Image: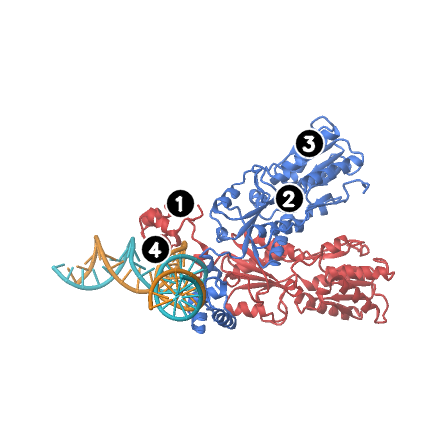
Chain colours: A red, B blue, C orange, D cyan
Amino acid sequence: MRRRVTIRDVAREAGVSVTAVSHAMNGKGTISDTTRATVREVAERLGYQADPLARGLRNSPLGLIGLMLRPLDSLGTYRPDGVDYFTRLAGAVAVECLDREMSVMLVRDLTRLPRSPLTLSLDGYIIDDPVERDPVIDLLTGLDIPFVSVGRDVGRPEMTSWVDSPLREETETVLEGFHGSGARSVALVTGTDRNSWNLDSIAAYEGWCRRRGVRPRIARRPESAGSDGGRAAVRELLADGLGVPDALYCLTGRHASGALAELRSLGVDVPTQTQLIAGSDSEQCRSSQPPISAIDLEPALVAAAAVHQLMVRLGRVEDSEAPELHSRLVPRGTTLPWRS
Amino acid sequence: MRRRVTIRDVAREAGVSVTAVSHAMNGKGTISDTTRATVREVAERLGYQADPLARGLRNSPLGLIGLMLRPLDSLGTYRPDGVDYFTRLAGAVAVECLDREMSVMLVRDLTRLPRSPLTLSLDGYIIDDPVERDPVIDLLTGLDIPFVSVGRDVGRPEMTSWVDSPLREETETVLEGFHGSGARSVALVTGTDRNSWNLDSIAAYEGWCRRRGVRPRIARRPESAGSDGGRAAVRELLADGLGVPDALYCLTGRHASGALAELRSLGVDVPTQTQLIAGSDSEQCRSSQPPISAIDLEPALVAAAAVHQLMVRLGRVEDSEAPELHSRLVPRGTTLPWRS
DNA sequence: GTAAAGCCATAAAACGTTTTATGGTGGGGA
DNA sequence: TCCCCACCATAAAACGTTTTATGGCTTTAC
């Protein structure tokens, strides 16, 4: 019962050689039409499917790609409380793959040994938020494994295999929204990972400040510091002698929730005295008191775009235009009503 | 560059046989301590890792489990709009696995040929919401592949390898809540899939009605009918001559959003005339007007429990107690304030 | 002093494919 | 009649492991 149908069973049943079966099934070699038909018929009847492991041993594609969530690698745990962008992205990628007759597996940092099995045999990779000059990208490049990153590797301007949300416009939307509702002093709280998510947002913020004549106020805290990091960031900002900012843009949801708590415990009312937006929606944003206005990065769209581009690189689909990416501001209780 | 380090390379370098290397690495066979140490040292130096494909050919575990989302199989698409329980579950399972040095891949209906490659070589499976006497379970049982289901197979009372939310208590909470806020006639809208999610909820509902002396009113619509199904369910309920129910419990979020729309277009005010709760939270619930009160099934908890139990079955972990499951009612705009 | 019992190492088979190289048959051209 | 070639089919090697069977060498037991 345990035993599966092998190519030998088909060969015996069809009265031909193993080679004939292989050729008939894969359309290679030379074989007469009638033999091919017989073999295929027998294979179908027996429910034969080539064992992908045996096949993979000879370097055929497995129909399986890998997904690496780099921020979780550096975080150390794959279950950070209150962060759900990653689970949403992973689920969405999986679903995108299924619809394309492929599968996806989630993979840890490839440069950390021991690697989990199979990882070097996958057909391709999606790398979410690579760090600057990410060693994983060196590894994949060296092994000739195709990949697409979500977010640029900021240390490799020449690389083209990436997709990303329009960070610049997002930042612009947030800052202009703040400004439009009267906020003048707008501060930014970012993480410390050197990925495009942090660096591009900072650049966009600084550009906007320059154009608007606003003095930039930035606090950086490690992503791993969580809400404590957000609290500390607020204290740091308040210590610069420029007073309480009118608005705060925290890239990560956990920083935002810490920042909100700190502001309130300092007696600063949100949103009337200071408005707050998180750059990445999460459960913590939704369940804070008041719930934090946030940007929904639409991981489903990101996944669709990334998978599409990877399929192009794998030659499984022709190079059509990729789905457009855009994110969405979800106003909640930490922003004043904006003109929409 | 492309070529990986093989067991033969290690053997040559260490001056021993291939067998010796295999035994040294896997702790099997008989080998002296000194040889083992040498081999391990060489393997480490060369960065040797056994090829999982070659290894799998001999039936060793791949470190990879499969996840099947049965409702999506019957739905036909893996990307149903407005349903996010599945992506959340998939992501959470992935993350749970990573934290255990395993990987997970999402897999389509195994009984549908052609199967995607690798699927029959996986170490184990998690099957979300199996249907009654699910053929997939027959297949896995026949192949001796360990599995855990999320939700019971209602046709196999003898099966023990499952985890589930406390559906009975959930239903009880919802119905008692309705009752406590004055609702007397409480109707139920379910799907038509014969899984424990639907059937257990119905049983719990009927039991409650009996105890409370309430006349049961149930409408069933296919899950695939989406919000149109919800609209139709409401029309069906209103046609029974018992008037507008005081409260409605719709198991699926899409049915709930259709039901809400239909009620409002019929001039029934929600929540003052009829209250509404969805049994499974989703984006559609959150973005309806008004947002629909819903039960968050806490897919992260479900995933943790399921993965834990599967690891026990795989013998990768001793049989400790599994994480407790519970879900959470999220009150929004379609319920009256309840005493909490 | 011999037999039995470890101990250690290895050769070879097996896993299920794909691919390369080879062979056999029949037909057509010279 | 002979040779070459096209056409089919197959044997065998290869992929990188694990496992089984075997054998030589030391000890230990009697």
User: In what element is the residue under mark 4?
Assistant: helix
Q: Position of residue B44 (x, y in %)?
A: 52, 71
Question: In the image, what residue type sits under mark 2?
Answer: Asp
CB of mark 1 within 8 Å of CB of mark 4?
no
Instruction: Say which residue label 2 marks.
Output: B164
- Share a chain, discs 1 and 3? no
**Residue A65, above or below B321:** below
Mark identifier at residue A19:
4
| Front tag of 3 and 2 | 2
Taking the spot 79% from the left edge, 60% from the top edge, the residue there is A276
| Chain letter, disc 3 residue | B
User: In what element is the residue under mark 1?
Assistant: helix
Taking the spot 73% from the left edge, 66% from the top edge, the residue there is A190
Q: Position of residue A179 (x, y in %)?
A: 80, 62
Q: Is residue B110 visible?
A: yes
| Front tag of 4 and 2 | 2
Instruction: Say which residue label 1 marks.
Output: A46
Instruction: Say which residue label 3 marks.
Output: B206
Label 1 and label 4: CA atoms lie apart by: 18 Å
Q: Nearer the viewer, residue A319 or B301?
A: B301
Farthest residue, direction top:
B241
On screen, residue A246 versus residue A321, left or right, reads: right
